[in-house]
Image (cartoon, coloured by chain):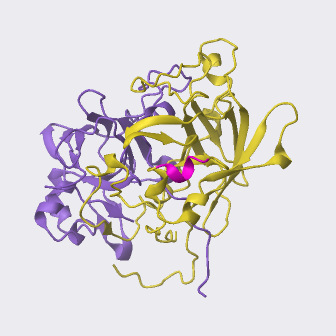
């Protein structure tokens, strides 16, 4: 089994980003220890599609349905879809995606969120789906609202959905956030701005996909996800030094 | 111009509400998947791993989330590998896994790695997850040849990767994100 390409840490946000104050005491000071990958880094949990429930990828309906009700969440109805691939463009099939988000008013259903916007009785904000054989995935939800948070006084988060992806190996594990095209809060956000390269930020912005729009039902956004790529096998018996 | 590849999607913090998506029961959410992901059912010698993630001034990171990955008792990974997820206790910061003792793993050039569990740490304020390992205190002889531990120059830093034994099959593994006795984190 070949190795994954090295992670380009200059593309990811660094650990210490004082504009995002919580990172100040939660960022290691020592350099990360670079080490070759072994079997535990080149493998990861394998989830089966049959663990998913029918409505796991439908955040508009899944919360009410979990309690046996039939209500739908309030907000702009959207479908998010895209392809999970690796740095070489190869599809990452049958990988688990987990998503979570605030409701249309910008409030999370979480004991620590005390924002004054109301909870939506029909919205939990938790969903899951799995990519298909071609790496494609989709889920349906409502567009989350922006919300204030304490950082420099009241900063505002742009509308966003948290996205967790496993890939095929622990080395590919990734958690990120999806933003929406045209949101003027994106360039103002201290968490977005932990990323130094504007092209990397652009990768986190889902694009309005009018070609896939569902008439008189919902808008569609496209969000492709790229995980680390795997090197090719050139020589089976190549010397492998430390 | 060198060959170009697609760029990996950049990471963002999992944030304070990570439980909604990854541990809905801990968020108090009535969803249909409320499994206790920190209890790993597998054959082998049952063990408990507990600890606290501390920030740079020693405060417990009470919104941390950890993921564990290790081989089963026969050393198998892939579809047989053991995976778990635990949230820090919202009051005390204590996380807990119930799993089995992993065996040694092979490495390159016919070497082997001392038994260990791989751990990823996610939290508000952590922009890209941190990757560490927990080794077992009984395996000191194997630690002397373990390729990861041998790369850590300072014996004090090496000890940040070894759990302490609380009792039979009961281990304590605290993680320090920053500062004195900062845990070794890997880029692999």
- Work out which quarter of the rendered image holds the N terminus of chain B and state it: bottom right
Tell me: residue A83, above or below residue B166.
Answer: below
Tell me: residue A237, above or below residue A195.
Answer: below
- What is the span of residues highlighted in magenta in the rendered image? A184-189
Tell me: residue B15, above or below residue A40.
Answer: above
Position of B81 compared to B121: left or right? right
Number of callouts: 0
Report which quarter residue A203 is drawn in.
bottom right
Q: In the rendered image, what is the letter of the chain coloured purple?
A: B
Residue A124 image position (x, y, % from top left) = 56, 24
Q: Can you name the residue that lies furthest to the right here? A: A215
Residue A188: in magenta span: yes
**Nearer to the camera, B56 or A85:** B56
Whether residue B165 can be seen here: yes
- Work out which quarter of the rendered image holds the C terminus of chain B and state it: bottom left
Q: Residue at x 17, y 55 (%)?
A: B179
Tell me: residue A59, above or below residue A22.
Answer: above
**Nearer to the camera, A177 or A199:** A199
**Nearer to the camera, A228 or A193:** A193
Q: Residue at x 27, y 69 (%)?
A: B147
Position of A108 compared to A74: left or right? left
Residue A61: in magenta span: no
Residue A104 image position (x, y, % from top left) = 61, 28
Residue B122 image position (x, y, % from top left) = 38, 46
Q: Residue at x 42, y 45 (%)?
A: B82
Q: In the rendered image, what is the letter of the chain coloured yellow?
A: A
Q: Can you name the residue that lies furthest to the bottom here? A: B1
Residue A82 image position (x, y, % from top left) = 70, 51
Position of B123 compared to B182: left or right? right
Whether residue B103 can be seen here: no
């Amino acid at each position: 089994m070949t190795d994954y390409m090295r992670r380009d840490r200059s593309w990811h946000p660094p650990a210490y980003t004082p504009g995002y104050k919580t990172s100040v005491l939660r960022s290691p000071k020592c350099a990360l220890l670079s080490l070759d990958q072994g079997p535990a880094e080149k493998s990861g949990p394998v989830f089966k599609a049959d663990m998913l429930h029918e409505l796991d990828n439908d955040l508009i309906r899944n919360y009410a349905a979990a309690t046996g009700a039939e209500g739908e969440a309030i907000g702009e109805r959207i479908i998010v879809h895209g392809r999970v691939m690796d740095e070489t463009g190869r599809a990452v099939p049958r990988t688990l995606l987990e998503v979570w988000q605030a409701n249309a008013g910008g409030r999370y259903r979480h004991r620590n969120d005390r924002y004054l916007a109301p909870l939506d009785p029909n919205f939990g904000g938790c969903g899951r789906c799995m990519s298909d054989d071609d790496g494609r995935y989709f889920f349906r939800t409502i567009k989350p609202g922006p919300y204030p948070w304490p950082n420099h006084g009241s900063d505002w988060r742009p509308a966003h959905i948290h996205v967790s992806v496993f890939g095929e190996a622990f080395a590919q594990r990734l958690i990120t956030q999806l933003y929406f095209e045209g949101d003027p809060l994106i360039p103002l956000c201290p968490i977005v701005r932990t990323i130094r390269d504007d092209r990397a930020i652009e990768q986190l912005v889902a694009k309005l996909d009018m070609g896939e729009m569902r008439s008189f039902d919902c808008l569609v956004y496209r969000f492709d996800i790229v995980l680390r790529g795997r090197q090719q096998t050139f020589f089976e018996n190549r010397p492998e030094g430390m | 111009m060198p060959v170009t590849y697609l760029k990996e999607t950049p990471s963002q913090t999992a944030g304070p509400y990570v439980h909604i998506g990854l541990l809905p029961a801990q968020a108090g959410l009535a969803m249909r998947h409320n499994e206790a992901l920190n209890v790993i059912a597998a054959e082998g010698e049952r063990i408990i791993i507990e600890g606290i993630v501390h920030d740079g001034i020693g405060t417990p990171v009470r919104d941390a989330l950890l993921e564990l990955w290790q081989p089963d008792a026969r050393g198998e990974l892939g579809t047989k590998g053991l995976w778990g997820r635990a949230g820090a206790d919202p009051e005390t910061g204590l996380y807990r896994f119930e799993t089995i003792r992993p065996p040694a793993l092979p490495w390159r050039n016919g070497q082997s790695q001392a038994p260990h569990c791989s751990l990823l740490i996610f939290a508000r304020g952590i922009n890209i997850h941190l990757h560490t390992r927990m080794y077992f205190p009984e395996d000191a002889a194997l630690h002397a040849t373990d390729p990861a531990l041998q790369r850590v120059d300072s014996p004090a830093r090496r000890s940040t990767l070894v759990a302490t034994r609380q009792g039979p099959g009961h281990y304590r593994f605290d993680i320090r994100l920053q500062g004195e006795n900062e845990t070794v984190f890997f880029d692999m």
